[in-house]
Amino acid sequence: MDTKKLFWDLYLAATESDVDCIISNQKVMSSQENWRPYGDLENNFGVVENQQAHPIAALIEKITNSIDATLMRRCYEEDIDPRSSAAPKSINEAVEKFFPNNKNWDISQHQYKQAEDIQIIAHGPRKETSLVIYDNGEGQHPDDFSDTLLSLLRGNKNDIPFVQGKYNMGGSGAIVFCGSKRYQLIASKRFDGGPFGFTIVRKHPLTKSEVDKYKNTWYEYFSIENQVPRFDIQEIDLGLRGRQFTTGTLLKLYSYQLPPGSRSVISRDLNQSINEYLFEPALPIFTIDNNERYPRDINPERSLYGLKRRLEKDEYDSKYIYKHFSEEVSDWGGFKITCYVFKFKTDNKGSKETRGTIRREFFKNNMSVLFSVNGQVHGHYTNEFISRSLKFNLLKEYLLIHVDCSKLDPSFRNELFMASRDRMKDGEESSELRKKLADILKRSQLKEIYNEFRSKITSGDGDQNKILKDLGKNLPLNPDLTKLLQQTLNLDDIKKSKNKKNDTSKKRSSKKEQSSFDGKRYPSSFSINAKQKNGELPVIQIPKGTESTIKFNTDVEDDYFDRIEEPGELKIALLDYSNSQNGGNRKPQPTDISELLSVAKSSPNNGTIRLHIKSSEEVEVGNSIKIQATLTSPVDDDRTQIFWVKVMDTQNQTKKPRKDQTKNIGLPTLHKVIESKSQDEPDSKTWEQMDESGMAFNADTVVQLLVGGDKLEAVYINMDSNALKKFIAKQGNEERINFARNRYLSSVYFHTLFLYVISKNKKYTIEKEGGNGIELQDYVADVFENYYAEFLLNFETSQLLEALSD
């Protein structure tokens, strides 16, 4: 048969229906004897089907293979055996070695040129998009297809340290999302010579007799007399950007099942999703659509280089990012946490529009905590981690957390992620990591940022809470109900002076304003914040088994550890280890400080670097550890500080007795919210003020709740809601209008309070259709927005009793 014509027929086929027609009309393809089991495994259905659960995650495996192939080609071109000691030991090392100009990839023209080596191209109609994936990598000889591109479970890259692929399954994960027939074209030519080979993969169509014989079908690929079809080429025009195809690999995924939000222009929508899953890829990539599919799109071709660079790019950082910082942790071999806090409101958009843009641009797949290995996301949490584990509810829509797990011990890391690399295991290790992550972030800069945003909407109560406080003092509550409220509400001592609190916050604010910090690009100073005697090293005392914080003063800018260009690092080294209780006799020197201390290093923050340490079980009371902290500089001498850490006994430390909180019950603070500033309501918040703190108010909004930790702290009631305006319009005079406003205020407040308290203490979880969980405070706000407030205002008990008695 004419193999060249067959290839072109298959390549130009737009959808799986077109491929069906080609197979039906080709006698050699319609014959079952010319189809072989994928991976030479007849029982391969479970292997292929039991991989990625999401079409984007499956597609990422294809791109990862393309990156691997590109690095492998460069290794061979450098005449290096990829399995030898001369080969790079990591992906980052490979990029530095094989692409010495990689620092220029942040410049568009250089990024575009490199990105042409890996391309994703849209084919076919808009409603049934097929995807072509091309890479200019090593390629494969047709005789080797069965051992490489068509193999399963052979682990053919497991002993090559600078590639991501390990399990030899990534090539098959995306097949299950290729329409209903699972058609996938594979074509390749090796970079150092040989013919151009191709085949097509499909799910075997069971015959009537086979349906009764087999429990499952299987996956298979086309061959002629047990050989992959082939023909010779020098170059061919496959519609690639900026080049002809000469060598490399080409895949076509027919009628690919892209999820909602990624089905439009792939250079925009799919590009954003890939950026999320490839947080920091080794190489840039092109996504390409065309004006035949989308005539009005002005930019059908876009490069992508991972979400990290997108977030830290000047145009996005200054526009959307309020602050980003990192925490580096030594546990389990070490991992790094980077937090990106988004602005609640940009210069030209309200909070609701800003939030919509942020979610669309950076959270397309509802991933708020990303766990990556070598830049590829292997698992994630939704924003429930932010609201439930961190208790930072105001930040749940505005916080992205990246956890780089590349340096974790392999034995620990392998227990975190499924082999499919798209989700986390629900095991002991993942539970430990989640707890550690929450503990670190709850005492990080996030706490300060959260309190800063919270203060904007909790200050200036005026006297509008007086009636509620008086009621709180005199409510005839039985002990059980009091206990119920205590478990859920913010139980501040209602006798405390509000003015005293305001004075304290003003002092803190003025102090912060006076000490504005202007960091330098490189450090010129670095010193430990501790008392020390002349000529002696500082001694930091820490309780055994309890985390302690050591502060260092510096003059370097806040993003020094995290910026892409010329970043610095805080290195912690072990110098000595002794036991002072035994006359200073030294114990055998450990090989690494992680054997003695758990260490977490925070980004600089206004001239302060925090080092959080906790002694391990191996360290005894009285032991001393000599440490050297080094702040590196890429252009100057490193700055060092040497100090001792002494472990102290905690048994003699006494805790202050907790105050009995049952004597006073404080209700959540009540805040009136109005559309715009009014002299009649000087203490009320405006819609704009609430917008700036992440709580969107409009005419349909009735109530919003502020939850701090597990406590309901404040209730914000919209006094310019449509529900209240409609009710007021029915009242005749000023007295009735005032009564209506007071009724609205009290009804919404107390119904909100008890809806929240009862639902919280009964441990209800709320889900919308589709299994999407929502927070309790959002549910309560939604209930009031959907006619509940109008019902409360218009409901009369006396009228109901009269109706029942008739």
Image (spheres, helix red, strand yellow):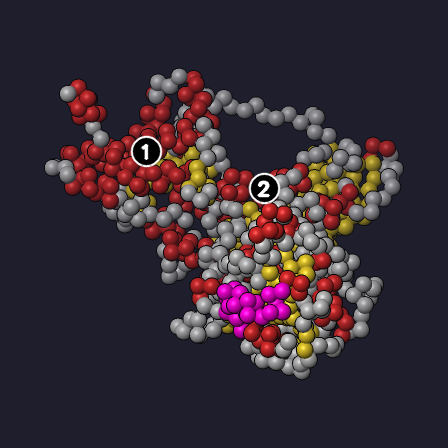
User: Are circles 2 and 1 on residues that touch, CB within 8 Å?
Assistant: no
Position of residue 677 in the picture relative to residue 58 (left or right): left
- Would you say residue 796 is visible in this rendering? yes
Q: Secondary structure at mark 1?
A: helix
Residue located beneath label 1 in the image: 749
Residue pictured at 64% horizontal, 59% vertical: 220
x, y percent for residue 470: 33, 26
Q: Amino acid at mark 2?
A: Ala
Q: Is residue 231 above or below residue 381?
A: below
x, y percent for residue 584: 86, 37
x, y percent for residue 93: 73, 64
**In front of the other: 460 or 259:** 259
Q: Is residue 648 above or below residue 34?
A: above
x, y percent for residue 36: 68, 61
Residue pictured at 34% horizontal, 51% vertical: 688
Within-10-Å neighbours for mark 1: few <14, some 14–19, many 20+: many
- Would you say residue 684 is visible in this rendering? no
Q: Could you say which quadrant of the image residue 81 lies in?
A: bottom right
In the rendered image, residue 52 lying in the magenta stretch gets the answer no
Q: Magenta segment range?
A: 12-31
Residue located beneath label 2 in the image: 438
Q: How many marks?
A: 2
Position of residue 712 in the picture relative to residue 444 (left or right): left
Q: Amino acid at mark 1?
A: Tyr
In the rendered image, residue 18 lying in the magenta stretch gets the answer yes
Nearer the N terminus, badge 2 or badge 1? Answer: 2
Within-10-Å neighbours for mark 2: few <14, some 14–19, many 20+: some
